[in-house]
Amino acid sequence: IKNIAVLTSGGDAPGMNACIRAVVRTGIYHGRNMFGVVQGYQGLINNNIIPMNARSVSNILHMGGTILKTARCLEFKEDAGMEIAFKHLKEKEIDGLVVIGGDGTFTGAKRFGEKFGINVIGVPGTIDNDLYGSDFTLGYDTAINTVIEAIDKIRDTADSHDRLFFIEVMGRDSGCIALRSAIASGAEAVLLPERETSLKELITKLKSGASTKKSSSIVIVSEGNKYGGAYDIAKAVKRKFTHYDTKVTILGHLQRGGSPSGFDRILGSRLGFAATNALINGESMKMVGLKGNEIALTSLSEALSGKSNYKLEDDLLEMTHVLSI
Ligand code: ADP
């Protein structure tokens, strides 16, 4: 491997910059030529591939977002788009590619690697924590902390006014952010895509809290749960339970931003360092992840297909019920 390019793709996540920095500096340390692709796969197609040196990544470790920008690129899903992308890499004699992103990004990387034989290593960068082969994805810890900080603020006003709040958090079809933030913020209930909680059960829980003099209640609603968004659920609950003044907050994209937590800076650095080292050591078509505090390599196909192996922790869910009585 002589020349390595790095790109970020799909949804941005805090810690991506720490990872880019680690990828670039590890490659330079080992005498490789390093490149950054601007705007993910779109940048490959547009030939927006820039040389990077150690100073190109100065002062970015602590920054949210991604200095390389990210994009969703439909053209890359077509063979013709992939061929243009490959041509541009070939012109620069780039023989190694690090892609930082989520499952869509890995699906593209897998097809691209299989088709053209380019060496590809994936880094799991998504706040959703929904990839198999890494206990944590980049940005997840920061997102949880952001959500907790927001809920703490909402709790102040909820408590002062005797209010019931429905707070919608991100995660697509993964309830990881919702469950963790429910525990850390002492939420009264959490609705997850992985579990069915009946409205009746939810209302019973809220009534029990009200009857034991809870002055506020918070329900975390993960996007992708079966009842729809927080507004739908608030409306349905309000029809049957009127004890509290009911409000809804959708946290939205603020969950994707912000300076990465210490954990995500370290994770980004470790995964970036490991990704470049993996390429240099002749690895390809794999994802670098963290398993039990060790760097682990998982094939891209396993990282994608093993998703269904993930089991939401029942003990954590039970704990949210017990600790919020
Ligand atoms: P994420 O990586 O966060 O899951 P997306 O699902 O938007 O985000 O995927 C990011 C990009 O990966 C897409 O915009 C597209 O360019 C590429 N991609 C996704 N699926 C495929 C596919 N089946 N073939 C080729 N490229 C794909």
Image (cartoon, helix red, strand yellow):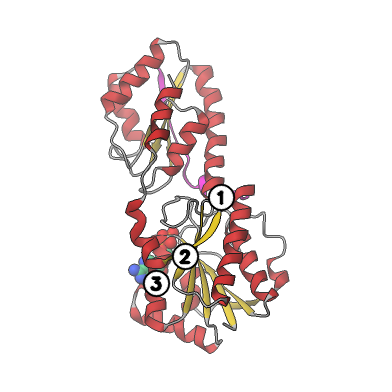
Label for residue 257?
1
Q: Horizontal and vertical percent for residue 26?
A: 65, 70
Alpha-carbon span between mark 3 and mark 1: 28 Å
Query: What is the three-letter code of the residue carrying label 2?
Result: Met
Relative side of 258 to 120, left or right: right
Q: In the image shown, does 234 or 29 lie closer to the viewer?
A: 29
Residue drawn at 55 percent across, 87 percent down: 93
Alpha-carbon span between mark 3 and mark 2: 10 Å
Badge 1 marks a residue whose secondary structure is loop
Query: What is the three-letter code of the residue carrying label 1?
Result: Gly
Relative side of 302 to 289, left or right: left
Which residue is under mark 3?
110
* Magenta residues (range): 243-260
Task: Please tell me whether residue 246 belongs to the stretch shown in magenta.
Answer: yes
Badge 2 marks a residue whose secondary structure is strand
Disc 2 crowd, CA 10 A, few/some/many (<14, 14-19, 20+)? many
